[in-house]
Image: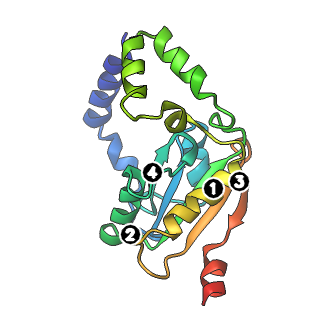
Amino acid sequence: MRKIDEIMAFNEQFVANKAYEEIERNYPDKRIVIVTCMDARLTELLPKAMDLRDGDAKIIKNAGAIITSPFGNIMRSILVALYELNAHEVFIIGHLHCGMTGIDPDSVVEHMLERGVPEQTIHTLRHSGVSLNRWLTGFDSVRESVENSVDIVRNHPLLPPNTPIHGLIIDPLTGELEKVIDGYQYLESIG
């Protein structure tokens, strides 16, 4: 059975059996927005490791928890969460053993070609001002990546003043959190 068919069959039973009634719904308590990696190991682990319940956090996921542009989709989502969805703090959470560590953009392009993307498409993009190497590059250090993403958020001209921006690293095996940047300490230091 195709995955979409499996999901739709399950969903039909989920709704028919009113399984949604078992899900505890809460009004937001922590009121935070999290940017983290899309790594499947974090799906259940991260909320449990942070004692998050349904409604506590807006969770934005991408490859590597990387914020690359101050005016990209991730930053827009953070600002919407802060201004319109009642979030008050931002957490950037990278993780140990991330697949974006040391990723080779040339290898990604090679896999694109192997999976059927025409070479002409790659050629056209490269000669149209798109730097695939920059766009597909990961990072060498998860700590530096978290620090860089925190800096992009912290220095955004539309960020509400005095918003704590925290940087953390989570162990995807144990859930242990390491504080890289404490947003409260930073705000106190600039005073």
As drawn, 1 above or below 37:
above
Contact (Cβ within 8 Å) of mark 1 with mark 3: yes
* Residue situated in front as seen by the camera: 64 or 124: 124
Give the Cα distance between marks 2 and 4: 13 Å
Task: Identify the secondary structure beneath mark 4.
Answer: strand
Give the Cα distance between marks 1 and 3: 5 Å
Give the Cα distance between marks 3 and 4: 19 Å
State the residue position of label 4. Answer: 60
Mark seen at residue 82: 2
As drawn, 22 above or below 115:
below
State the residue position of label 3. Answer: 143
* Residue situated in front as seen by the camera: 35 or 76: 76
| Amino acid at circle 4 | Ile
Contact (Cβ within 8 Å) of mark 3 with mark 2: no
| Amino acid at circle 2 | Leu
Task: Identify the secondary structure beneath mark 1.
Answer: helix
State the residue position of label 1. Answer: 146
* Residue situated in front as seen by the camera: 103 or 81: 103
